[in-house]
């Protein structure tokens, strides 16, 4: 397969507080990780998905994904470790690797195609981004404003993030520091990371509020 996606879904979802791992929470009856896998496959540019779940959920996740070109493996203690476990399970024939949060179940296939297209066009690392709408300020420990950040040079970062497979493997080699995204590991190597347009629908379900928004969006779309 030319393009393989790693889907980290091994988090516990503390901030959502659903009582089950977040990726297994149903959105209009369909678990988030299943929606995320189907969104990747609907792009028609992803050949295989490696889904990374808590060790005691491997069999359950595999049953949910029957019939899809997907493999399920056990994750690690933090997101970076889970991605590394998924990366180890991607075949050596993968040219492009995407890393996509299971917690972004409504990501439009167009975003996936834009990211893969930019890697195919020669970029070693590509991330989908959105402009930041709010004014952003830096504060001290007491909550007093230190400065106002120039919003025009900030971007909010989404997934899937796309990489030439060899570059992502190099970035994950050894024992990398835990990071909240994979492009951060590539940046640490000094490699260029380029951006493409993200989409508001690629938002991450983090809190109960986000889950409610996702349910409302699906109801509005009749899905
Ligand atoms: N993730 C993972 N392995 C971990 C931690 C996180 O695969 N050890 C995954 C999550 O399942 C999620 C993505 O990384 O799809 C983004 O993480 P986040 O939104 O923080 O999810 P959780 O860690 O599950 O949530 P929380 O931080 O609220 O516990
Ligand atoms: Mg987390």
Image (spheres, rainbow, N blue to C red):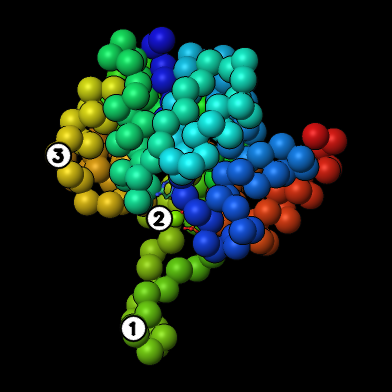
Q: Residue at x 83, y 43 (%)?
A: 219
Q: Is residue 96 left or right of residue 134?
A: left
In terms of secondary structure, where does tag 3 sit? loop
Q: Is residue 107 left or right of residue 128?
A: right
State the mark number for residue 140: 1
Q: Quadrant of the C terminus?
A: top right
Q: Residue at x 57, y 44 (%)?
A: 23
Judge whether 197 appears above or below 118 on screen: below
Between marks 3 and 1, how big is the CA–CA gap? Answer: 35 Å
Marks 2/3 in contact by CB < 8 Å: the verdict is no
| Residue 158 drawn at (x, y percent) | 48, 44
Give the image quarter of residue 137. bottom left
| Residue 81 drawn at (x, y percent) | 31, 44
State the mark number for residue 30: none
Give the image quarter of residue 103. top right
| Structural crowding at the residue carrying mark 2, measured as other residues with C-alpha within 10 Å and reported as few (<14), some (14–19) or many (≥20) | some
Q: Is residue 104 left or right of residue 179?
A: right
| Structural crowding at the residue carrying mark 1, measured as other residues with C-alpha within 10 Å and reported as few (<14), some (14–19) or many (≥20) | few
First in sequence: mark 1 vs mark 2: 1
Between marks 2 and 3, how big is the CA–CA gap? Answer: 30 Å
* Residue indicated by mark 3: 174
| Residue 122 drawn at (x, y percent) | 30, 19
In terms of secondary structure, where does tag 2 sit? loop
Does the rendering let one see residue 10? Answer: yes
Between marks 1 and 2, how big is the CA–CA gap? Answer: 20 Å
Judge whether 43 appears above or below 79 on screen: above
* Residue indicated by mark 2: 154
Q: Residue at x 64, y 58 (%)?
A: 18
């Amino acid at each position: 397969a030319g393009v393989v996606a790693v889907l980290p879904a091994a988090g516990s979802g503390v901030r959502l507080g659903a009582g089950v791992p977040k990726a297994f929470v149903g959105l209009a009856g369909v678990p988030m990780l299943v929606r995320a896998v189907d969104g990747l496959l609907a792009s028609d540019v992803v050949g295989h998905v490696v889904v990374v779940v808590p060790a005691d959920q491997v069999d359950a996740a595999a049953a949910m994904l029957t019939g899809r070109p997907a493999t399920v493996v056990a994750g690690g203690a933090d997101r970076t470790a889970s991605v590394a476990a998924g990366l180890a399970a991607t075949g050596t024939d993968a040219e492009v690797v995407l890393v996509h949060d299971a917690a972004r179940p409504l990501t439009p296939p167009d975003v996936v195609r834009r990211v893969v297209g930019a890697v195919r066009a020669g970029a070693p690392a590509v991330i989908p981004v959105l402009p930041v709408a709010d004014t952003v300020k830096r504060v001290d420990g007491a909550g007093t404003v230190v400065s106002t950040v120039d919003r025009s040079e900030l971007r909010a970062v989404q997934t899937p993030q796309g990489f030439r497979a060899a570059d992502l493997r190099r970035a994950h080699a050894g024992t990398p520091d835990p990071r909240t995204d994979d492009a951060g590991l590539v940046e640490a190597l000094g490699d260029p990371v380029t951006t493409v347009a993200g989409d508001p629908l690629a938002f991450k379900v983090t809190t109960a509020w986000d889950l409610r928004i996702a349910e409302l969006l699906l109801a509005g779309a009749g899905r």
